[in-house]
Image (cartoon, helix red, strand yellow):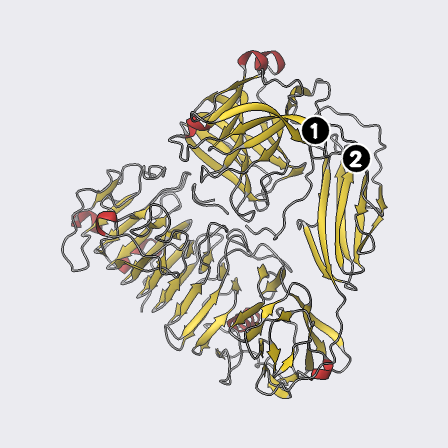
């Protein structure tokens, strides 16, 4: 939910193929109200009749389907001289030719104000005749985003309760290059400032129809997509207590994105859309023939919320069968191939959900043998393997990951399947106890000739013998020990036995070593699990040996844990995690397989967590193909009282490197990033004697127009809790370095980096730099108020205790910095103000909680 360059979650690699279309307010149905269903072996033919408006009623106030070829209900004011509106022929969701209103974006790439994005409004005379003074209503329309490349911010919003071009409620779609970045949004625009208070990741693609509904009842705003209520976390709506909007007409807003709209409706918000919801949010189903069946629960409701019927068909029932029993549909993978599973509402055949199934051939245990000595870890016959070991397989040359097949681990005593890993689309549940961190994972990594495979958490037991099985299609293009790779089965005898026992309970400290060295664990997460179980140990220490630990971490409700590395640069805990893979900040839940967020380390309600002498790295590389938020640590305190200590440590990511809540102290650290890479809804975060490093942005290499001299970025987007001290940088250095792909940071006359930018909202932009040295990559304005569309901070004029502040900023050589060009929204503090605001030393900064941490 960060400002206009911030988009946020995970989407599968395929898109929603057919979209559910919400039923019209006031519709009636002759179907009985019992919840029944049927299945079929092939797709049901749908009459090629365009969807059109029903007769209006007491609950449907207005509808426009453009079937008359006209747009005379609308005032159309396209932006840019070459943008245009027209009623055109279009293909409906059922294949029929229909009429729709098309907006073709022009060459305008950046709009100067939100007000200029209002491109269509219903005529006052039409609104007065059809809706009148009604303030509570829903506005709904079918929207088809279309491809155009003339804008970066691709919002398509319905306008509700319009007052003027700068004041209105909003609800609609944010369409980006990656469906992992697209989302449904709602909120309000006040005085031309857009607040997207409600944001929920949904896969949205150009060329597909979506039915979008914004429901406005009092101050409550609720969004629906294709008949389903949209949730932001656990919230199904937002309360608009800011705008004060109570009535007004409808319209359309876009930041220059081409689109089609059809079947625009305004109606009574007590009438809900036809609902056809599936218990799985996935639009793809990947399995092998013979795998266990997948049960799906279907919720089907009519517009009056009574039970509806539905049908289910499989386009290729020999590949996947779809069997219905009550409200449960069971999909069974039978043979290799693909099939489209279609769910259709009984009361409204335009309401459709689909799942695309891809089924690989049945797993066959290979009989090929190889000389595996020196080729696998754990080694063949290993008798003291770790239960958290990774598997490694070294080919003769670099292999290619296949498109089908699985990797399996069997218990040798009875050939029972213990774990199965798909080649893509995997999830895991990290942690132990009442909450786990559910994440999408990439458990198969290829580096040179070596494949590293991470089993699912907690699958291996102590004192047990296992063997590995790999499908013949899992890896291609390489030989293994001189033999053409044809899979690995029991005959190949890649077998090993785990250690007889795990570490005894109650240890004050445990050790972790990635490979080779004897230790208690092979992964840091296993050590965290140990102390989340052994809660009686007062101040546990996890000693981590030098090595690279490619893993995601989770700690929940466990105080005083210290993770101490053998050396700062020798211990690297890393993962390629980002918002497209795992959306949002994340949280734990019982037996979760999703929702764990985009950070490498998620720590929740764990007071006095200490990270000492190590590197925490998010290896994600920024690209226009992804939603790039990618923290190293998400430190979350539900009551904003918990404390984090980081010392003698490095934190490296391109975007959103550090997220903190509560209280945190970073001492002698290096924090690297380029987009808002320090942020959080916190109380106090002190960065002392640290290097804060702007790195080149991989998304904009020098060959990109406008970036020949390098890139810039923003150090912070604060979002501090109201009245709290916020982010304090004391005796630290702000420097720059090339990014992970070699992109440079612009310096000197080309400087384009800023200390902070603001985010609209009720939080405060409380940031202070005290006695800090700054390199020449920071723009003379220092603070990004009214830069590139960024808003003014809160407060808009800084005081000694609030807002954007500096004291004694210096060059790298210690010479006083010329701050005459600083933004007028910021303040240069005096020595007396530093003292009175308690900013001059560590004890003063943490004075509100009486905490003085020591190095």
Determine the residue positioned at 46% across, 73% down.
548
Q: Earlier in the sequence, mark 2 or mark 1?
A: 2
Determine the residue positioned at 31% across, 59% down.
693
**Residue 540: image x %, image y %?**
47, 73
In the rendered view of the protein, which quadrant contains the C terminus?
Answer: bottom left
Horizontal placement of 51 versus 168: left or right? right
Q: Nearer the viewer, residue 38 or 657?
A: 38
**Residue 535: image x %, image y %?**
54, 70
**Residue 457: image x %, image y %?**
61, 69
Q: Secondary structure at mark 1?
A: strand
User: Is label 2 or label 1 in front?
Assistant: 1
Name above or below for residue 37 compared with residue 403: above
- Residue 378 seen from this side: yes
Name above or below for residue 86 compared with residue 626: above
Q: Nearer the viewer, residue 35 or 790?
A: 790
- Residue 836 seen from this side: no
- How many discs appear? 2
Q: Are marks 2 and 1 in contact (CB under 8 Å)?
A: no
Q: Which residue is mark 2?
A: 46
């Amino acid at each position: 939910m960060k400002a206009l360059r911030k988009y946020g979650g995970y989407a599968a690699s395929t898109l929603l193929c057919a979209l559910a279309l919400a039923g019209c307010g006031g519709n009636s149905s002759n179907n009985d109200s019992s919840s029944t269903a049927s299945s079929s072996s092939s797709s049901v033919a749908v009459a090629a009749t365009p969807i059109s408006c029903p007769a209006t009623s007491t609950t449907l106030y207005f509808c426009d389907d453009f079937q008359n070829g006209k747009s005379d209900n609308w005032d159309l004011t396209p932006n840019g001289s070459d943008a245009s509106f027209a009623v055109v022929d279009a293909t409906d969701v059922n294949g029929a030719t229909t009429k729709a209103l098309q907006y073709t974006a022009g060459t305008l790439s950046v709009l100067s104000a939100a007000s200029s994005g209002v491109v269509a409004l219903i005529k006052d005379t039409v609104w007065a005749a059809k809706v009148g003074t009604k303030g509570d209503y829903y506005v709904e329309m079918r929207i088809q985003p279309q491809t155009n490349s003339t804008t970066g911010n691709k919002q398509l919003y319905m306008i509700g309760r319009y007052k003027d071009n700068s004041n209105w409620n909003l609800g609609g779609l944010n369409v980006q290059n990656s469906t992992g970045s697209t989302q449904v949004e709602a909120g309000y625009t006040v005085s031309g400032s857009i607040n997207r208070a409600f944001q929920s990741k949904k896969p949205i693609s150009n060329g597909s129809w979506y039915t979008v509904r914004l429901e406005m009842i009092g101050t409550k705003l609720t969004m629906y997509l294709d008949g389903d209520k949209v949730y932001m976390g656990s919230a199904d709506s937002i309360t608009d207590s800011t705008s004060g909007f109570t009535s007004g007409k409808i319209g359309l807003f876009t930041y220059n994105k081409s689109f089609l709209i059809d079947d625009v409706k305004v109606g009574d918000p007590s009438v809900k859309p036809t609902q056809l919801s599936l218990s799985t949010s996935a639009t793809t189903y990947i399995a092998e023939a013979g795998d266990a069946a997948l049960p799906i629960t279907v919720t089907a409701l009519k517009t009056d919320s009574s039970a509806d019927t539905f049908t289910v068909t499989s386009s290729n029932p020999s590949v996947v069968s779809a069997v219905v029993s009550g409200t449960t549909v069971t999909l069974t993978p039978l043979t290799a191939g693909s099939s489209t599973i279609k769910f259709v509402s009984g009361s409204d055949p335009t309401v459709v959900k689909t799942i695309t199934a891809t089924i690989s051939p049945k797993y066959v245990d290979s009989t090929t043998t190889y000389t595996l000595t020196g080729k696998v870890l754990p080694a063949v016959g290993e008798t003291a393997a770790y239960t958290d070991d990774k598997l490694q397989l070294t080919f003769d040359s670099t292999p290619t990951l296949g498109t089908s097949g699985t990797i399996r681990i069997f218990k040798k005593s009875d050939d029972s399947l213990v774990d199965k890993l798909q080649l893509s689309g995997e999830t895991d549940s990290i942690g132990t106890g009442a909450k786990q961190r559910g994440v999408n994972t990439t458990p198969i990594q290829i580096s040179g000739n070596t494949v590293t495979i991470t089993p699912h958490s907690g699958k291996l037991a102590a004192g047990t013998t296992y063997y590995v099985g790999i499908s013949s299609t899992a890896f291609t293009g390489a030989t293994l020990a001189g033999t053409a790779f044809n899979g690995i089965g029991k005959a190949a005898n890649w077998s090993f036995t785990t250690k007889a026992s795990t570490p005894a309970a109650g240890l004050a400290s445990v050790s972790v070593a990635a490979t080779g060295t004897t230790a208690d664990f092979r992964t840091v997460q296993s050590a965290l699990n140990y102390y989340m179980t052994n809660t009686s140990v007062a101040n546990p220490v996890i000693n981590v040996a030098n090595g690279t630990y490619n893993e995601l971490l989770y700690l929940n409700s466990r105080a005083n844990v210290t993770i101490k590395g053998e050396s700062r640069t020798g211990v690297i805990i890393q993962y390629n995690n980002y918002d497209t893979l795992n959306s949002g900040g994340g949280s734990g839940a019982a037996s979760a397989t999703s929702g764990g967020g985009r950070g490498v380390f998620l720590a929740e309600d764990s007071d006095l967590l200490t990270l000492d002498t190590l590197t925490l790295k998010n290896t994600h590389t920024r690209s226009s193909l992804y939603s790039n938020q990618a923290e190293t640590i998400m430190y979350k305190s539900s009551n904003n009282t918990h404390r984090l200590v980081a010392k003698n440590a490095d934190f490296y990511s391109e975007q959103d490197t550090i997220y903190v809540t509560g209280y945190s102290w970073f001492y002698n650290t290096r924090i690297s990033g380029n987009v808002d890479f320090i942020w959080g809804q916190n109380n106090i975060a002190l960065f002392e004697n640290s290097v804060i490093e702007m790195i080149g942005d991989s998304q904009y290499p020098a060959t990109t127009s406008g970036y020949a001299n390098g890139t810039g970025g923003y150090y912070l987007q604060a979002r501090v809790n109201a009245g709290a001290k916020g982010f304090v940088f004391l005796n630290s250095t702000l420097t720059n370095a090339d990014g992970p792909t070699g992109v440079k940071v612009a310096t000197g006359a080309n400087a384009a980096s800023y200390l902070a930018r603001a985010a609209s909202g009720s939080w405060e932009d409380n940031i202070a730099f005290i006695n800090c040295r700054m390199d020449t990559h920071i723009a003379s304005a220092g603070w990004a108020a009214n830069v590139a569309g960024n808003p003014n901070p809160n407060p808009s004029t800084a005081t000694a205790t609030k807002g954007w502040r500096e004291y004694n900023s210096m060059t790298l050589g210690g010479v006083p910095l010329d701050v005459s060009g600083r933004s007028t929204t910021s303040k240069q503090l005096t020595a007396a103000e530093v003292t009175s605001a308690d900013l001059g030393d560590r004890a003063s900064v943490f004075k509100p909680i009486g905490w003085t941490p020591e190095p």
